[in-house]
Image (cartoon, rainbow, N blue to C red):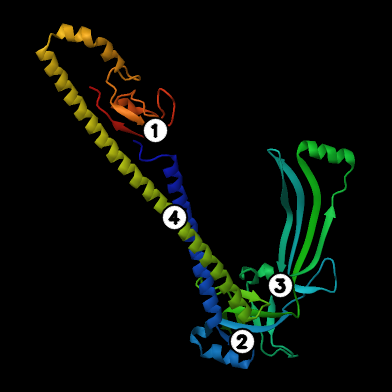
Amino acid sequence: MRFIDGVDVGCLVGIGFDFILAYGLHRLYKRALRSAINIENVQKYSIDKELSKKLEDAPYSVIPYGCIEGVIYPAVATLKSNFNSEKEGVMQHTSLVEHKSRRVQGIWSDVKNVIRDTLEMIPFYLVPHGEGLHTTRVLVTEPNSAHHIDEELSVTHENFIQTPSDIIKKGMELISGEVHKGYQETEKMLLVGRHLMAIGKLVKEGEEIKMMPPSSDFRYILSQKTKDELVRLHRNKATIYKVLVGVLGVAGATLICVLVYRYYKKIRNYEDEQRKKQEIQRLRDQEEQRRARIAHRTNPETLLSSTSDNWDQSKCVVCLTNEREVVLLNCGHVCVCGDCAFALPEPKKCPVCRERVDRFVTTFTP
């Protein structure tokens, strides 16, 4: 009996994959929940002289995790939009993506090929709202390392340039299996004068206050959303991850139960098989003893000649050696010995009528 078959291997692979996926989602859940708690508990500071004083009083002039809000103000000459001269910003992301369809094994699928993807930035400050001289300001460093900073950029230009083609070119592309659709040109910018919230490490170096990435336990955030919106966003993500972990947990537990049940059935079947083999062997021994007693009391030659026809008729139809010892159910044929009954390939079928064998029981043929 095989204790491990293809279904068991599939269950084991499924359990392993389920565990790995659940573990990864659980890490994402913990990270999102920790970010929500950190953002909710972070202290908010106003950009004024009081902030400078608090940094001077803090150890090493550092606040490990703080929140400020202000207006974007460039430290040097601004970046101008390539398509609208009135748009000025401190970060500029431009991309050119080629769109085409490709045939793979008879199935068409869309393919994107990035031709150009550039990011430019300049140093910039966060200054208080409505203050002209900006006596207190905070320099934002490494804005490109902020969490999902690309989502905070405003789209200043987006255009799809369709590739010109005629009937002949289109036909050649269909035959070759690659159809060019066109190019998508996109420009995004972090515009000057926009409101921005920054959460990270506040440091005072000399007379200048800087906002920079915090330690690895916290997230560096630059966002145009409010603090409450960010908390709600991260908690929603954590809830989704938690639900997915629960679903995967139920699926994994179900697979484990199926695997345990299958092994339990196999062990029970193995025990029944061993019991039947012992019973068949016991009947064989009894039959041999009975025939030995008959042979001892009668003439062996007479016995052999008188019972040869019956003996041939009682042979197993498979091995032609042992006697017929079991009844195949549900067809009821008595045609095989115990060894051949166990050796029948799965699914077991009667050698005589080819009907499916649900089970078999031992019998005694006098």
Circle nearer the viewer, 3 or 1: 1
In the rendered structure, are the residues bearing label 3 and label 4 in contact, judged by CB atoms less than 8 Å apart?
A: no
Residue 48 image offset from top left, x and y in percent: 64, 91
**Residue highlighted by disc 3:** 122
**Residue highlighted by disc 1:** 330
Who's the residue at 49% across and 59% down the image?
Answer: 248
Q: In this view, does 251 lie to the left or right of 120?
A: left
For the N terminus, the quadrant is top left
The numbered dot on residue 281 is none
Q: Let me know if residue 221 appears in the view.
A: yes
Q: For the residues marked 4 and 1, what is the alpha-carbon distance in whole angstroms? A: 33 Å
Circle nearer the viewer, 4 or 1: 1
Label located before the other in sequence (3 or 2): 3
Q: Which of 276 and 363 is in front in this view?
A: 363
Task: Give the vertical position of 88 relative to 366 (above or below).
Answer: below
Number of other residues with Cα within 10 Å of mark 1, as a class: few under 14, some 14 to 19, many 20 or more? few
Label located before the other in sequence (3 or 4): 3
**Residue highlighted by disc 4:** 254
Helix, strand or loop at mark 3: loop
Q: Which image quadrant for residue 138?
A: bottom right
Who's the residue at 32% across and 40% down the image?
Answer: 269
Label located before the other in sequence (1 or 2): 2
Label located before the other in sequence (3 or 1): 3
**Residue highlighted by disc 2:** 207
Residue 203 image offset from top left, x and y in percent: 56, 82
- The amino acid type, in three-letter code, at marker 3 is Ile
Q: Nearer the viewer, residue 318 or 183?
A: 318
